[in-house]
C-alpha cells in the first residue's frame, strides 16, 4: 500500500463547496487503496483577516501571540474538511500541527521544522483513516504554537512526506503544473512533465510562484518526489524529483523565470580594496534589507563599480543608505532604478553544454535588449534589464532555446 | 499576594474596542498587586458562525471535529487580549485549554474537566505575567481538543480558581450582579449582595441566566467564592459563597427565577402500577428529550394522572411519543400546553421556616393565578402556570416575601 501526501492551498478550499470538491479528489485517491494524509492551508483570505485584527491592536505585531491567533485559520479548515469526508462516508480525523507532533524551533512567525513524531499520523493511517493535518504550523518543545511563515504549508507537506517515507507528495495549486515560463507572458509556454529538484529550486527562487523554495529545498535534501497538480482539473501535472544519476535525455534549458519585485543600485568609483564590499553592504544589512544579485567590476583608474539588487519595497531606504556610504567612501556617484526585471534561464543541461550564456546574450542583443547585470550559477543564468523588455525578452529566449517545441 | 481569576464572556469582548476596555479592567486589578488569570469566551457570534459552517456540511454535526473547529473561537480571543495587554505595556501570555493543561474526559461537545495541571499557569504567574486562558475547552489524555458545552467558560474559570486555590473568581457579565428576580419583569427587583452557592444553584437551574449551573455546582463542591460583576460598570456585584456554618441574618427567600422554555404534557387515566413511569418516560428519553418536572397523582378509579415538562422545542415530538404510549397503555387521554412558565422561589431560609409554600399558594390564589404543577426541594418551590400569568405572579410574590425591601 502506498502512502500519498496531498496538499491543498487556500484558494482550493475557500468555500464549503470547494472543500466538497477537494474531498471528492481525496476520496478518489483513497479508493485506489492508498493511505492518505492531506495537508491544508487556511481558507483564502482568512490569514489576512486575522493579521488585520492583530494589526488593529499593534501595527508592528509579531511573536508568540500572533502565531496562536493565525494558526486558528488552518484549524478551521482541517475540521471542516474532516467533517466533509466523514459526511461522505469516509473515516477521517483532523490534526493540528501540534497534535501531529510537528516540532519546530521557537522562532515565532517563521519557525523551522526540527522533527515530526510520525507515530501519531501512522496510528490513524493504520486504522484506515484519512488524516487531515494543518499546514504552516507546529509546536515548540515548550508547548508554544508556531507558524512557519508564508507558504509554509508546502514545507509542512514535504516534511510530513519525509517523516512518513511517503511514495509521493502531491501539491495541488491553481495551475496544472510547472511551465517553461509564465503562460500569461509567453503564450507558447509548455507544461513540463518532469523537472529536477535543483532546477525547480532555481525556478522558485528566481520568481516562479508555483512552489515555495523552502519546500523544494527540503524535498531535494531528503529525496522526496513532489507532484504539482491542479486542484480544479484532472491531469498528471509536473513531477519534481532529484535525478540520482538516472540517464535521461535532458533539455538544456528547463524553464525561464522572472522577478519584477527587485530594484537595482549602483555605486560608481569606489576604491578597489579589500573589505570594500562589506563597507557598502554592511549598512544595507543593518537596515534589514536583503541583497540578491551582487556584481563588482573594476572601472577606470583602479576604481570599482559595485551593483546589487534589493527588494523593490526597500529601494528608497537602500538608496539613502548607499548615498551616505558614498560620501564616507568618497565614491563618484550613486545610481539606481526600480523599474527593472530579473530574467533567469534554468537547466541542469547547462552544466555540460558550453555556449548557453553567449547564445542568450546574442539573442537578446539581436532584439536590442540591453543587459545591466549578469549573474550565473551552475544551472542558471540571470540577467537584469528594463522592466519594459520583459515580454519580448522572455518570448525570444523561450523560442530560441526550443521551449515551445 | 492574592490570586484573582477573572472571566469575561463573548459580549464583553465582541470587538477590538471592547477588548481594550476589558484590558483596562484587568490592568487595574493587576496594579493592585494581584496575580491575575483571565478566562475568556469567543467573541460574541463567533461560536454560532463556526457551528453554522459545520452545519452547512452536516446538519446533525457533532463529535471530535466540531470541537476542533469551535475551539478556534476562544483561541482568537486569548491571543487578541494578550496582544492588547502587551501593547499596553504589560507582560501577558495566552494559553489554549490544552496548553493550560485542562484535562477533560472524551465526551466531545460536552466534556467534563477531570484535572488541571496548575504548574503551567503558576510558572507564568511567578514570572509576573498576566495569564489569559481560553475558556470552554480542554484536552483529553489522548491529545484531542474538547469543549465543555455552552456556557462552559464559567466552569473553566471556577475550575482554574480551584486548581490555583485562588482568592476570588470574578465572573464579568452584562449585568451588575444577581437580582431577586428579573428586573425586566419586576421593576422592584433588588441586587443581592451575597447569596449562598446552594441558592444560586437553584436560581441558575430554575432559569436565572447569570451563571451556569455547572459552574455554581463546581464552586460549591470546592468552596470557591464567585463574584458576579458587570463588565461595563463599576460596582461590588454579588458574592456567591457557601456559608460554612456562618451565622448570618438570612432572608427566607433570596430570589425568584422563571423559565419560559418549557412545555407541559399530561397523560390521564393510566393504570397505577409499578413501572408505569418508565413505560411513559422511556420512549421520551429514547427520543433524546430531557424531562424536568414530573408529577404523578392518583385520580378516579385507581387510575393515575401523570404530568411532566419538556423543553418547548421538543414539545411536538414528545406529544407524539406520548400519544403512542397512551394507545399502548390504554390511557384515557393526552393533554398539553407549550404556553406555560415555571416560577421558582429559592432560599436557604425555607429549611427552617414552615409555611412558605402555603403562603406562596395563598398569594397566587388571591391574585387568581391557577397552578397546574407544583414541585419542591429543600430550598426551592416551583410552580407551573400559564405564560400569561408570569408578570403578575412574579410581582406579587416578590412583594409578598419582602424582596423589594
Image (cartoon, coloured by chain):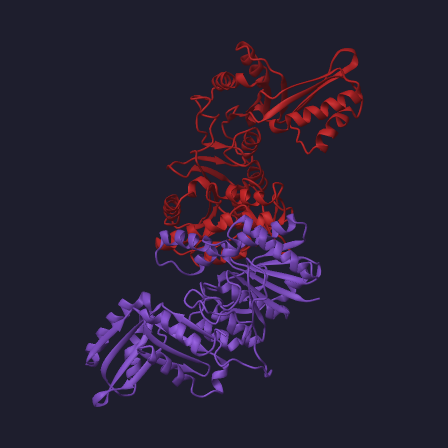
Chain colours: A red, B purple
Q: In front: A396, or A44?
A: A44
Residue B53 in percent (x, y) is at 40, 51
**Which quadrant of the view contains residue A54?**
top right
Residue A269 showing in the rendered view: yes
Residue B16 in percent (x, y) is at 54, 48
Q: Is residue B5 above or below residue A304?
A: below
Residue A102 showing in the rendered view: no
Residue at 43% x, 72% y is: B257
**Is B93 placed left or right of A85 in the picture?**
right
Residue A351 in percent (x, y) is at 59, 25
Q: Is residue A126 above or below residue B164?
A: above
Residue at 20% x, 78% y is: B333
**Is A295 placed left or right of B171 in the picture?**
right
**Is A286 placed left or right of A182 in the picture?**
right
Residue B178 in percent (x, y) is at 51, 69
* Position of the N terminus of chain B by quadrant: bottom right
Q: Is residue A273 above or below residue A33?
A: above
Amino acid at each position: 500500500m502506498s502512502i500519498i501526501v496531498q496538499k491543498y492551498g487556500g484558494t482550493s478550499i475557500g468555500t464549503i463547496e470547494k472543500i466538497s470538491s477537494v474531498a471528492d479528489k481525496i476520496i478518489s485517491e483513497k479508493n485506489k487503496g492508498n493511505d492518505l494524509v492531506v495537508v491544508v492551508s487556511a481558507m483564502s483570505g482568512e490569514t489576512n483577516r486575522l493579521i488585520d485584527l492583530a494589526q488593529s491592536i499593534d501595527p508592528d505585531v509579531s511573536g508568540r501571540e500572533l502565531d496562536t491567533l493565525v494558526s486558528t485559520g488552518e484549524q478551521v479548515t482541517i475540521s471542516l474538511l474532516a467533517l466533509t469526508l466523514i459526511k461522505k462516508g469516509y473515516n477521517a480525523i483532523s490534526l493540528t500541527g501540534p497534535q501531529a507532533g510537528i516540532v519546530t524551533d521557537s522562532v515565532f512567525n517563521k519557525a523551522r521544522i526540527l522533527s515530526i513524531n510520525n507515530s501519531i499520523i501512522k496510528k490513524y493511517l493504520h486504522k484506515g483513516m484519512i488524516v487531515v493535518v494543518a499546514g504552516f504550523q507546529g509546536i515548540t518543545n515548550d508547548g508554544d504554537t508556531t507558524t512557519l511563515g508564508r507558504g509554509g504549508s508546502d514545507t509542512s507537506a514535504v516534511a510530513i512526506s519525509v517523516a512518513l517515507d511517503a511514495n509521493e507528495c502531491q501539491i495541488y495549486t491553481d495551475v496544472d503544473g510547472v511551465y517553461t515560463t509564465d503562460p500569461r507572458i509567453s503564450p507558447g509556454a509548455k507544461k513540463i512533465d518532469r523537472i529536477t529538484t535543483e532546477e525547480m529550486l532555481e525556478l522558485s527562487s528566481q520568481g516562479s510562484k508555483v512552489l515555495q523554495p523552502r519546500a523544494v529545498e527540503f524535498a531535494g535534501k531528503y529525496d522526496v518526489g513532489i507532484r504539482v497538480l491542479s486542484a480544479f482539473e484532472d491531469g498528471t501535472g509536473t513531477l519534481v524529483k532529484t535525478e540520482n544519476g538516472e540517464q535521461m535525455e535532458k533539455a538544456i534549458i528547463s524553464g525561464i523565470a522572472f522577478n519584477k519585485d527587485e530594484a537595482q543600485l549602483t555605486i560608481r568609483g569606489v576604491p578597489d580594496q579589500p573589505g570594500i564590499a562589506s563597507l557598502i553592504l554592511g549598512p544595507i544589512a543593518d537596515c534589514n534589507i536583503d541583497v540578491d544579485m551582487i556584481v563588482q567590476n573594476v572601472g577606470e583608474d583602479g576604481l570599482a563599480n559595485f551593483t546589487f539588487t534589493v527588494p523593490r519595497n526597500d529601494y528608497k531606504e537602500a538608496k539613502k543608505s548607499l548615498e551616505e556610504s558614498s560620501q564616507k567612501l568618497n565614491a563618484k556617484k550613486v545610481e539606481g532604478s526600480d523599474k527593472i526585471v530579473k530574467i533567469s534561464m534554468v537547466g541542469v543541461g547547462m552544466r555540460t553544454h558550453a555556449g548557453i550564456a553567449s547564445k542568450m546574450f546574442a539573442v537578446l542583443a539581436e532584439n536590442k535588449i540591453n543587459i545591466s547585470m549578469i549573474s550565473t550559477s551552475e544551472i542558471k543564468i540571470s540577467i537584469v534589464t528594463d522592466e519594459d523588455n520583459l515580454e519580448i525578452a522572455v518570448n525570444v529566449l523561450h523560442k530560441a532555446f526550443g521551449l515551445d517545441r
